[in-house]
Image (spheres, rainbow, N blue to C red):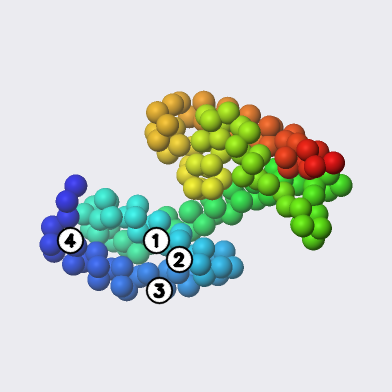
């Protein structure tokens, strides 16, 4: 859907007025200005195709703020899940970065079957929700959940993350 010139101008004005303030709010939630800028940008990306409708709401800024806060919450929840996954690896088995060895998540992901890797990267790295991953990959949401579960299990048992291949 193409915006009219008037809608584009109104959206630019809305962006200029709301973006700095919303970044400040989200930065307080995330503790990171850079992450807040990413989240707010994503919220605006989601707004653009809905602008004609959302601009008529009583509080378009409320809609945008809600989207940004939900995105921040989702990102935090997903990061917590991913950190929890990595904590499942016993500390004694994780190579010590201070000794010049690093946990190689990239190699561990590469060992996953492509379908599980796609789901894991889209979910944990790109921060996409399960329904969006399902649409992107053209599969059922249950299949996405199954692939994510398999990826978490495989990563928690990965010799690459455990450092077993370097002992």
Q: Nearer the viewer, residue 37 or 102?
A: 102
Q: CA distance from mark 4 to mark 2?
A: 23 Å
Residue 131 in the image: above or below residue 49: above
Quick check: marks 1 and 4 in contact, CB under 8 Å? no
- Secondary structure category for the residue under label 4: helix
Q: Nearer the viewer, mark 1 or mark 4?
A: 1
Q: Which mark is residue 20?
A: 3
Q: Does the image show residue 79? A: yes
Give the x, y percent position of residue 149.
Answer: 62, 31
Residue at 48% across, 29% down: 141
Secondary element at tag 3: helix
Reading the image, the residue beneath label 4 is 7
Q: To which residue does mark 1 refer?
A: 41
Residues tagged 1 and 2 counted as in contact (Cβ below 8 A): yes
Residue found 27% across the figure and 51% down from its top: 50
Crowding near the residue tagged with mark 4, few <14, some 14–19, many ≥20 C-alpha atoms within 10 Å: some
Q: Secondary structure at mark 2?
A: helix
> Disc 2 marks which residue?
37
Please report whichever mark, 2 or 3, sits nearer to the chain's N-terminal start: 3
Neighbours of disc 3 within 10 Å: few (<14), some (14-19), many (20+): few
């Amino acid at each position: 859907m193409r915006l009219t010139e008037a809608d584009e101008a109104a959206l630019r004005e809305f962006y200029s007025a709301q973006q700095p303030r919303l970044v400040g709010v989200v930065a307080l939630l995330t503790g990171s200005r850079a992450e807040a800028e990413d989240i707010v940008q994503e919220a605006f990306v989601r707004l653009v195709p809905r602008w004609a409708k959302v601009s008529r709401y009583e509080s378009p800024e409320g809609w945008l703020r809600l989207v940004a806060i939900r995105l921040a919450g989702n990102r935090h929840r997903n990061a917590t899940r991913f950190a929890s996954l990595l904590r499942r690896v016993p500390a004694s088995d994780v190579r010590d970065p201070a000794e010049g060895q690093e946990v190689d998540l990239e190699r561990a992901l590469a060992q996953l079957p492509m379908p599980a890797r796609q789901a894991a990267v889209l979910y944990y790295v790109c921060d996409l929700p399960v329904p969006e991953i399902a649409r992107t990959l053209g599969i059922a949401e249950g299949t996405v959940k199954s692939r994510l579960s398999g990826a978490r299990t495989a990563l928690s048992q990965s010799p690459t993350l455990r450092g077993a291949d370097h002992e």
